[in-house]
Image (cartoon, rainbow, N blue to C red):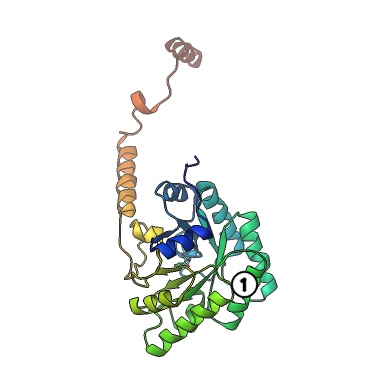
Amino acid sequence: MATNIKKKSILDFRRMMAQGEKIVYLTGYDYLTAKYEERAGVDMILVGDSLGNVILGYDSTYPVTMEDMLIHCKAVRRGAPNTFIVGDMPFMSYQISDQEAVENAGRFCKDARMDCVKLEGVTDSCISRIRAINDAGMLVMGHIGLTPQFGAQMGGNRAQGKSCDAALKLVEAAKKIEEAGACSILVEGVPAVVGKAITEQANIPILGIGAGSYTHGQLLIFADMVGYFDDFTPKFVKKYGDVGGELLRAFTAYAEEVRSGAFPDDAIHSYKIDPAEAAALEQALQS
Ligand code: KIV
């Protein structure tokens, strides 16, 4: 079911940034969740490679493939036809060359109808990939700070920019990413003062997840904030629901009722037959 919501564009996000209007950003991975996010008026949805942890049950994002991402991006697009959606480029979909990065970004935009792609990293090759994707006419969002695809090199998924030197490197990286043509930057897992410094120096919308309150918008993983994913919960997550608790309650009640015979109740949950047809059936079965 399409909503009457008007899809926002990069121009809307620039205007919101200029007017100090916060951008609401949430991850989504499937048709149903995306439908509710669009109904709730979420400004931007990220089909993140956190899909690996949240939906596919991996212990990291490394195993996620382009095919996994495209299936879920298409489902999210069907659920939220009027929302700006960002497709997250999975590990090894952009690392090898500019050409491969442009081809895969093209699959996100052309096959899955994403509005933008996102890629992690601050290295020279990452900057080059951003420039190449932008030159090809697509919107690309940078992702700096805690970048899980560099988790092995970071010694695990831990907060970044905790020293003056490390913080300044992130501010510099954000500038380079902006110069390379990124339409926006996601900053993850940094102290609030670092999120503030990056935001103050930027001319493009800065979105934060665990980066304090100063960024132009906020992202959360939907399954964390509705109390659904409970393998681990980062410090910056606020829970707005208890979906996991509600599922457990419903599944347990269903199991009890099936076992006791309370469900289904034939008077309510069963299809009816004309009494004459029922009598004829009974007679036929007896003969
Ligand atoms: O994959 C994702 O959902 C992300 C966020 C955690 C930043 O990249």
State the residue at coordinates (46%, 61%).
Answer: 15
| Residue 261 vertical placement versus 225 (above, below) | above
> At which x and y percent is residue 165?
41, 90
Q: Residue furthest bottom?
A: 165
User: x, y (%) of residue 18?
Assistant: 43, 65
Location of residue 146 with respect to 117 vertically, above or below: below
- Residue lying at 34% horizontally and 56% vertically, measured from the top left: 226
Residue 96, compared with residue 15, is above or below; it is: below
Front in this rendered view, residue 44 or 226: 44
Q: What kind of element bears circle 1?
A: loop
Residue 110 is situated, as x and y percent measured from the top left of the image, at 65, 56
Q: Is residue 203 above or below residue 56?
A: below
Decide if residue 69 is on the left or right side of residue 36: right
Q: Which residue is mark 1?
A: 94
Q: Residue at x 29, y 47 (%)?
A: 249
Percent from the top left, x then y, of residue 270? 40, 26
Between 258 and 47, the residue placed more toward the observer is: 47
In terms of image quadrants, where is residue 117? bottom right
Q: Nearer the viewer, residue 46 or 269?
A: 46
Q: Is residue 136 left or right of residue 116?
A: right
Residue type, numbered disc 1 = Tyr
Q: Residue at the far right: name it.
A: 99
- Quarter occupied by residue 190: bottom left
